[in-house]
Image (cartoon, rainbow, N blue to C red):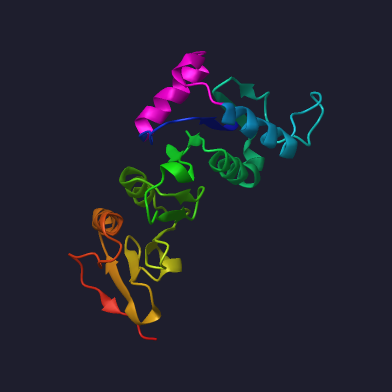
């Protein structure tokens, strides 16, 4: 079983569903579903320069579990699961540098290049999974709903240092089934915490932050943390 990523060019930011459909059609042998883009060849050259394909079946130095599928408008990359934590972030970085979209079907996340990101783009990080620059609301909500004993925290931050974060379980200082949520409005003096019993309440707090990071999410009882 491999960890797969797909890279191609988009003029506008695709939704998760649209990206998943594009990848499905590319895997089904429909290269015309994406436009031709010279940047893809530049990306591919940089990729194989850093992570060469295997010379033969016994070559274990390559991270790829099979040959790269390269077209005029796309690159499909099956990598070994054990190398994904090392290789996937670099693939996403290289795609962004070449102005290309990278889709992660395992997490259902679209990684967009800087040109397609919104001003003041947020950064999303979960305990498990790859960081996401400028996540859309659906991606943020899915990250919160995937909290578990193993995947126990999610952080969402804006460029100014404002953030909202959540942890679950003893490592977060929350009772079983509870969610410890923190919000900081740019400085240690404006750092607040609450403990929520319901995951959907946490989803709502994160959604409020996506809509307006400059305003503390409402509807919960925040307590100021002592310095």
* Residue with the most extreme left position: 219
Asked if one can make out residue 194 in the rendered structure from this viewpoint, the answer is yes
Q: Is residue 155 left or right of residue 199?
A: right
- In this view, which residue lies farthest toward the bottom? 227
Question: If the image is split into quadrants, where does the N terminus sit?
Answer: top right
Q: Position of residue 190 (x, y in %)?
A: 33, 78
Q: Is residue 223 above or below residue 29?
A: below
Res 158 quadrant in image: bottom left
Image position, residue 39 (x, y; %): 58, 31
Magenta span includes 20: yes
Closest to the observer: 118 or 138?
118
Is residue 143 shown in magenta?
A: no
Whether residue 77 sits left or right of residue 210 in the image: it is: right
Residue at the spot x=48%, y=54% of the render?
Answer: 150
Where residue 211 sits, quadrant-wise, is bottom left
Q: Which region shows up in magenta?
A: 16-37
* Residue shown at the point (33%, 72%) measured from the top left: 185
- Residue at 32%, 43% in the rendered image: 138
In the image, 134: left or right of 96? left
x and y, in percent, of residue 93 in the image:
58, 45
Q: Is residue 1 visible?
A: no
Q: Is residue 107 above or below residue 127?
A: above
**Residue at (55, 25) in percent of width and height:** 74
The quadrant the C terminus occupies is bottom left
Report the number of discs.
Answer: 0
Q: Main SS type for the magenta part? A: helix
Towards the viewer: 155 or 213: 213
Vertical side of 101 occupied by 170: above or below? below
Q: Position of residue 56 (x, y in %)?
A: 81, 23
């Amino acid at each position: 079983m491999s960890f797969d990523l797909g890279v191609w060019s988009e003029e506008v930011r695709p939704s998760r569903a649209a990206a998943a459909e594009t990848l499905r059609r590319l895997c089904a042998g429909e290269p015309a579903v994406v436009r031709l883009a010279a940047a893809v060849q530049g990306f591919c050259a940089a990729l194989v320069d850093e992570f060469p394909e295997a010379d033969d079946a016994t070559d274990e130095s390559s991270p790829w579990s099979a040959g790269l599928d390269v077209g005029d408008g796309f690159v499909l990359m099956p990598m070994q699961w054990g190398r994904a934590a090392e290789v996937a972030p670099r693939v996403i970085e290289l795609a962004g540098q070449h102005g290309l979209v990278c889709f992660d079907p395992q997490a259902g996340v679209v990684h967009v290049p800087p040109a397609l990101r919104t001003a003041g783009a947020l950064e999303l990080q979960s305990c498990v999974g790859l960081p996401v620059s400028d996540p859309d609301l659906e991606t943020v909500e899915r990250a919160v709903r995937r909290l578990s004993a193993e995947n126990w925290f999610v952080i969402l931050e804006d460029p100014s240092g404002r953030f909202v974060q959540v942890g679950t379980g003893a490592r977060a200082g929350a009772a079983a089934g509870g969610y410890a949520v923190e919000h900081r409005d740019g400085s240690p003096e404006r750092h607040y915490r609450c403990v929520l019993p319901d995951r959907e309440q946490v989803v709502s707090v994160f959604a409020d932050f996506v809509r307006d990071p400059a305003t503390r999410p409402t509807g919960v009882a925040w307590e100021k943390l002592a310095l």
